[in-house]
């Protein structure tokens, strides 16, 4: 399914959007926003916002990002599965990645990812430490915001500024 919001239009949902394959959501103008809070996508999710447009996606299962560019902030939640990327993520604003399911992982390890703003990571494991997170910041400095990872955390940055935190990171 391909969605395009043009001429001062945002892309929003008012009910569950079910897609058996891949979803592409693109805004064309005026800092357009993608706000899809009730997705049921089986394939990949590709997001492109115009200017400083923000994007929010909540999928009913795992969340697999195709190559995406968000000029503003990205908030992403996988409610019953893990989160992965199959293409580079270029996020100019802050990023928030959450897996809600017990033992679900976050693996965003494409080496050309670019997270310019701070990254918040949240995983859940109610009985141990199996909800791991792996984040590759590509060539940008990686800034970790306050985060809770109920498993192991692996982070990488190819930038000379390296990896810093702007809040408490609990692992």
Image: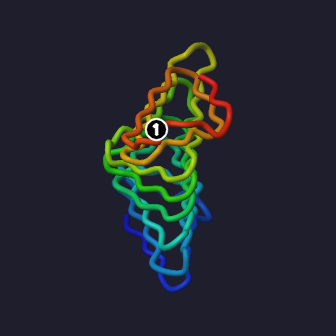
Q: Quadrant of residue 109?
A: top left
Residue 111 in the image: x percent, y percent? 32, 42
Q: Which residue is at the far front?
A: 160
Q: Position of residue 127 (x, y in %)?
A: 61, 14
- Above or below, 25 against 66 in this view is below
Crowding near the residue tagged with mark 1, few <14, some 14–19, many ≥20 C-alpha atoms within 10 Å: some
Indicate whether 77 appears above or below 23.
above
* Residue farthest toward the bottom in the current orientation of the protein: 7
Name which residue lies at 50% across and 29% down.
Answer: 104
Q: Is residue 107 left or right of residue 148?
A: left
**How was the colour assigned to the protein in this rendering?**
rainbow
The residue at 45%/78% (across/down) is 28
Q: Whole-percent x and y of residue 149? A: 58, 27
Q: Nearer the viewer, residue 22 or 88?
A: 88
Q: Position of residue 10 (x, y in %)?
A: 56, 74
Secondary structure beneath label 1 = loop
Using the image as rendered, state which of residue 9 and residue 148 is in the foreground.
148
- The answer to whether one can see residue 42 in this image is no
Q: Tell me which corner region of the image, top left, top right, bottom left or bottom right, holds residue 110.
A: top left
Q: Quadrant of the C terminus?
A: top right
**Residue 160 in view in this figure:** yes
The residue under the point 48% across, 41% down is: 61
Q: How many marks?
A: 1
Q: Is residue 14 above or below residue 8?
A: above
Location of the N terminus by quadrant is bottom left
Label 1, on which residue?
162
Of 27 and 143, the residue lying toward us: 143
Tell me: residue 66, above or below residue 143: below
> Which residue is most to the top?
128
Q: Residue at x 58, y 62 (%)?
A: 35
């Amino acid at each position: 399914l391909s969605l395009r919001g043009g001429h001062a239009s945002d892309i929003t949902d008012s009910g569950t959007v079910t897609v058996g394959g891949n979803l592409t959501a693109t805004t064309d103008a005026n800092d357009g926003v993608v706000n899809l809070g009730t997705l049921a996508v089986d394939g990949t999710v590709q997001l492109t916002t115009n200017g400083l447009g923000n994007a929010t996606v909540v999928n009913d299962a795992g969340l697999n990002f195709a190559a995406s560019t968000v000029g503003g902030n990205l908030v992403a939640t996988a409610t019953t599965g893990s989160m992965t990327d199959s293409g580079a993520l270029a996020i100019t604003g802050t990023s928030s990645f959450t897996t809600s399911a017990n033992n679900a992982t976050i693996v965003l390890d494409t080496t050309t990812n670019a997270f310019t703003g701070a990254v918040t990571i949240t995983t859940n494991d109610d009985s141990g430490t199996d909800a791991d997170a792996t984040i590759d910041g590509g060539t940008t400095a990686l800034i970790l915001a306050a985060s809770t990872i109920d498993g192991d955390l692996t982070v990488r940055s190819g930038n000379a500024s390296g990896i810093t935190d702007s809040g408490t990171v609990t692992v």
